[in-house]
């Protein structure tokens, strides 16, 4: 019941296409969407949505240690990012996928 209508979109990294992984996904009955290029930052919401906004948030800040970077990033994720933010990134995916397919797997944004 929880998996009814699930569509899984993941890249074709070796762990994702391993025989055991594919067998498990077949068992779930999920619809696996093909991923055109081997890896594309155009199709990873973390790359085109999360990191773009995080980069803007960090812009102009001078951080002097790894711990300071971790603290600032965690504060951003905990206080400034909500479910609607993540949903907006996922909602962009179909359009980005179509653009990538139209460009034969080439990068949408160069």
Image (cartoon, grey):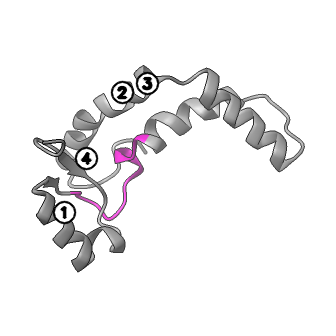
Instruction: For mark 3, give the secondary structure.
Output: helix
Left/right placement of residue 44 relative to residue 9 reads: right
Contact flag, marks 2 and 1 (Cβ < 8 Å): no
**Comes first in the chain, label 3 or label 4:** 3
Per the model, the C-alpha gap separating discs 2 and 4 is 20 Å
Instruction: For mark 4, give the secondary structure.
Output: helix
Left/right placement of residue 76 relative to residue 46 reads: right
Q: Residues within 10 Å of mark 3 (few under 14, many from 20)?
A: few
The part of the image, by quadrant, that contains residue 97 is top left
Per the model, the C-alpha gap separating discs 4 and 1 is 25 Å
**Name of the residue lying farthest toward the right:** 64
**Would you name the residue on which mark 2 appears?**
87
- On residue 25, which mark appears? 1
The N terminus sits in image quarter: top left
**Comes first in the chain, label 2 or label 1:** 1
Residue at (25% x, 55% y) in the render: 105
**Comes first in the chain, label 2 or label 4:** 2
- On residue 100, which mark appears? 4
Per the model, the C-alpha gap separating discs 2 and 1 is 24 Å
**Name of the residue lying farthest toward the bottom:** 19
The C terminus sits in image quarter: top left
Q: Is residue 65 above or below residue 96?
A: below
Instruction: For mark 1, give the secondary structure.
Output: helix
Looking at the rendering, the stretch of residues picked out in magenta corresponds to 35-45
Residue at (49% x, 23% y) in the render: 82
**Comes first in the chain, label 1 or label 3:** 1
Q: Nearer the viewer, mark 2 or mark 1?
A: 1
Q: Was residue 36 drawn as part of the magenta stretch in this picture?
A: yes
Left/right placement of residue 71 relative to residue 14 reads: right
């Amino acid at each position: 019941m929880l998996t009814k209508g699930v569509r899984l979109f993941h890249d074709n990294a070796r762990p994702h296409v391993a025989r055991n992984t594919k067998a498990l996904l077949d068992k779930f009955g999920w619809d696996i969407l093909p991923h055109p290029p081997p890896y594309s930052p155009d199709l990873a919401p973390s790359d085109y949505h999360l990191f773009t906004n995080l980069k803007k948030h960090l812009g102009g800040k001078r951080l002097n240690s790894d711990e300071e970077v971790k603290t600032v990033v965690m504060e951003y994720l905990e206080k400034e990012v909500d479910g609607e933010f993540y949903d907006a990134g996922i909602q962009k995916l179909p359009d980005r996928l179509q653009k990538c397919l139209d460009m034969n797997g080439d990068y949408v944004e160069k």
